[in-house]
Image: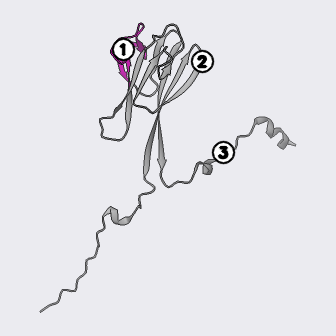
Amino acid sequence: MAVNNTQPIFNYQSSTDFGNDFSMAAEINESHLLIIEDDQGRKEVTLERPVYSIGRDRDCDICLNSQFVSRRHAVLVRLPRDDNSQSYYYRIVDGDSKGKPSANGLVINGRKLPAHDLKNEDEVVFGPQVRAIYYLLKDSMRTGQTDASEYDITLINPGMTDDFDD
């Protein structure tokens, strides 16, 4: 009678058995930014909330300073992407949250539209000399990396190099 002394050649371990060995996996971080230009100049708004009201009224989340902008000109709404990822996008809708349209409407990338799903570098015109440009910034970060000081860059003024020509 033969005795079976064989042992498995490969001992299977699930990914949970390896601990946190995937620390160098890439993560995609998205930032949503709106650059506004109106009668008072230029300002940046980082979009993080689910809903923003946009208009001339001081109670709006994003206040535009121009007589050509309606008190409640538009609404920005954050919506999840269809690809089941954790990311989202913003839709801009003309008018207030109750459905009343603005007086001048929205001109997005040169076309007058009642609503639009914003994409990187879309331009939204609210009125003469009042516009916004939307930016979707994607950062590919690796977890487990060192801090940003590893990539510290020293800039040299061109006038500083004259001393080295002697």
Say whether residue 164 is left or right of residue 70.
right
Say whether disc 1 or disc 3 marks the residue closer to the N-terminus.
Answer: 1
List x then y, in percent, for residue 90.
39, 28
State which quadrant residue 114 falls in: top left
Of tags 1 and 3, the one toward the viewer is 1
| Residue 105, magenta (yes or no) | yes
Q: Amino acid at mark 3?
A: Ile
- Return the mark for residue 41: 2
Q: Which residue is mark 1?
A: 113
Front in this rendered view, residue 142 or 45: 45
List x then y, in percent, for residue 49.
43, 32
Query: Magenta part of the protein: which range?
Result: 91-117
The residue at the point 42 percent across, 7 percent down is 104
Q: Amino acid at mark 1?
A: Leu
- Return the mark for residue 153: 3
State which quadrant residue 37 falls in: top right
Say whether disc 2 or disc 3 marks the residue closer to the N-terminus.
Answer: 2
Q: How is the image coloured?
A: one colour
Most extreme residue toward the left is 1
Label 3 sits on a secondary structure element that is loop
Discs 1, 3 touching: Cβ within 8 Å: no
Of tags 2 and 3, the one toward the viewer is 2
C-alpha gap between disc 2 and disc 3: 31 Å
Say whether residue 162 is left or right of residue 14.
right
Q: Amino acid at mark 2?
A: Gly
Asked if 163 appears above or below 104 in the picture, the reply is: below
| Residue 113, magenta (yes or no) | yes
* Neighbour tally class for label 3: few under 14, some 14-19, many 20 plus, Cα within 10 Å: few
